[in-house]
Every structure is written in structure tokens, then in C-alpha cells.
Amino acid sequence: MADLHVELVAADRNVWSGEAHMVIARTKSGDIGIMAGHQPLLGVLESGPVTVRTSDGGTVIAAVHGGFISFADNKLSILAEIAELAEEIDVARAERALERSKSEADAAAERRAEVRLAAAAGAH
């Protein structure tokens, strides 16, 4: 199976890079799966989990909030406003943020907290 090179970058750091069989991300047009040989692509990311099926059989999950996804020449770039690997997420803090956002009727904050919790749950 052919691989593609993946770079997941947030505004403040390089979050993850490596070789993968497939990447699944949420764009404004819906969820998309990208494998080696995919047509060139440029898309706007929605808040959602990004799942990377690594070449060594592992899985990397990140909570991504906004940004862009670009694919060309078997290189996938995910340029996120905010991105956290699932294992970096403090679940208790994310749960508190979710409750706080619900009580304040802050839909954007609620969505961010839900994505963080989904990414953390997907890694376990």
C-alpha cells in the first residue's frame, strides 16, 4: 500500500508529521478521506477530529479547530488554527469547558469542547 507524507501544523507549533496510509478530516464540504494518489485538494477545515492511520499500523487522532487542508504530490498539509493530539487533551478540563459553554450558551466554545472530548475518546 502506498503512503503519503503528512504534516499537521498549528499556528504555534508542528503538532505531528510522518507517513500515513490514510487521513480523515472534516471540511466545509463534509468528511474527506485522503490516501496516496488522491487528486490535488485545497479545502477549509471545520472543527472536528482528524484521524491519521500511520504507516506502522498506528492511529493518531487530533482535535483540530479551523484552518486549511492541502494535498499535492503525495504530501498532505493540515494547517490548523488550533490542534491538539488526543493524548494531550485534559479530559476533565474539556468536560468543565463543555459544561461552562452550555451554561453560557456559547455554541462555538461548546463545539470546541465536544471536538476535544471526541478526539480524546477516539484515542482510547
Image (cartoon, rainbow, N blue to C red):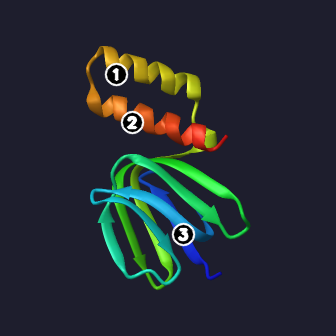
Q: Say which residue label 3 marks.
A: 6
Neighbour tally class for label 2: few under 14, some 14-19, many 20 plus, Cα within 10 Å:
many
Q: Residue 43: which numbered mark, if any?
A: none
Find out whether the residues at labels 1 and 2 contact each other: C-beta distance under 8 Å: yes
Image x and y of residue 45, in percent: 34, 56
Q: Say which residue label 1 marks.
A: 101
Residue 34 visible, this orientation: yes
Q: Residue 112: which numbered mark, if any?
A: 2
What is the distance, in whole Å, between disc 3 and disc 2 at their CAs?
A: 23 Å
In front: 112, or 30? Answer: 30
What is the distance, in whole Å, between disc 1 and disc 2 at their CAs?
A: 10 Å
Secondary structure at badge 2 equals helix
Taking the spot 53% from the left edge, 49% from the top edge, the residue there is: 62
- Quarter of the image for residue 98 reads top left
Q: Quadrant of the N terminus?
A: bottom right
Residue 14 visible, this orientation: no
Relative vertical location of residue 2 with respect to residue 23 in this rendering, above or below = below
Q: Is residue 55 left or right of residue 63?
A: right
Relative vertical location of residue 107 with respect to residue 45 in this rendering, above or below = above
